[in-house]
Amino acid sequence: MSSRSFVAMAVSNPITLEQNFDRDTNQAKAYLLPQDVFSKDELAQLNQHSNVKGLVQLLGHLAIIMVTGFVWLDIDNLVIQIPSLIIYGFSIASMFAALHECVHYTAFAYHPFNEIVAWLAGLLSFYNSTFYRAYHIWHHRYTRIERKDPELTDLTPTNLWEYIWIISGIPWWVGKLQTHFLSATGQFQDFPYIRETAKAKIQRSVQLQLLIYLGAIAVSFYYRQAWFFFGWLLPLAVGQPILRCILLAEHTGCTLDANPFANTRTTLTILLIRRLMWNMSFHSEHHFCPSIPFHALGKAHLKLQPHLNNLTHGYLNFNIALIKSFFP
């Protein structure tokens, strides 16, 4: 039985081609597969998706957004406003992690919940879930395989100035604006991972998302208030560098092959980061078996840790080590 069939049997909903995040069979066969490490019962238990756990996680994330947003916008005290802005901004930016989990259909057992939350999380984080799903499937299928993994087209820092440029978030903003424009206008020729049958759906999804942003801007102008800027745009810009530091750790400096224990990095981090990032810090574990939901990745880590080639203690330590590598 192939790894694709094995994992598909373990989840509660049928997996279609557009929802399959398993590694390419030809690439993966040279390395360990989930059934080589976990028993069938263990994998079935790890793959149990939960509406309750997903909802609790989502509500906790939204609570952080609302509390820190209230302090940032309504409390006239810079001493607490600035820290609140940083947490508020990162909690908005890290809704990307909620989108990511939902795109995998692992946040909730009920598939429509994943679809809805993914789209709304993308609205907050300036991603489009419909586009990202197609992009991310290829990233998982061809992780770190040159000319196939779409993430390899992103700039990888080789010196301090490139690092600062990436961490600033500016390339991300430019890339998102370009991608949203091309998608909204139906120009998909540069995106080989977009299936012909998905193009119209993605175009409509991005168009709706952009219309909502324009509507929010219009309301702000109508009432002569800077709600859009101070409530979303500025906080997201503040939070984006933190997210960039985290996402850089996932694959930077890892091998260019199909081994998920070598081409991906797991980072052990503090509880707040784990919560806001929906346990994406267990990234090798996630790539090894993408059908495991966020709330079971910690348990999977306990068994997979001996296999991990790239294990870092803290995102700060990773980024410091990366900067030091620029000055051999």
Image (cartoon, grey):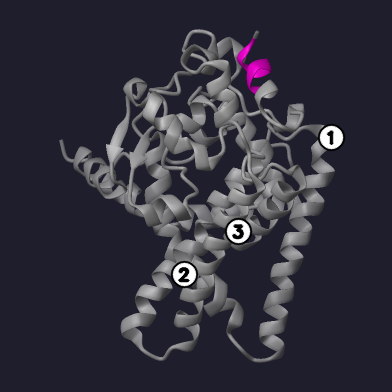
At label 2, which amino acid type do we have? Tyr
Q: Residue 88 bears which disc, if any?
A: 2
Q: Decide which of tag 1 and tag 2 comes sooner along the chain.
A: 2
Q: Residue 126 bears which disc, if any?
A: 3
Q: Decide which of tag 1 and tag 3 comes sooner along the chain.
A: 3
Residue 228, quarter of the rendered image: bottom right
Q: Nearer the viewer, residue 154 or 8?
A: 8
Neighbourhood count class around disc 3 (C-alpha, 10 Å): few under 14, some 14–19, many 20 upward: many
Q: Decide which of tag 3 and tag 2 comes sooner along the chain.
A: 2
Residue at x-position 37% and y-position 53%: 271
Whether residue 186 is visible to the viewer of this picture, yes or no, is no
Rounded to the nearest whole Å, what is the CA distance between mark 1 and mark 3?
24 Å
Q: Nearer the viewer, mark 3 or mark 2?
A: 2
Measured along the vertical axis of the image, is residue 212 above or below residue 22?
A: below
Position in image of residue 223 (x %, y %): 68, 91
Measured along the vertical axis of the image, is residue 167 above or below residue 157?
A: below
Q: Which residues are magenta?
A: 2-7
Q: Nearer the viewer, residue 293 or 184?
A: 293
At label 1, which amino acid type do we have? Thr
Rounded to the nearest whole Å, what is the CA distance between mark 1 and mark 2?
38 Å
Q: Tell me the quadrant of the picture where the N terminus can be found.
A: top right
Whether residue 218 is visible to the viewer of this picture, yes or no, is yes
Residues at badges 3 and 2 in contact (C-beta under 8 Å)?
A: no
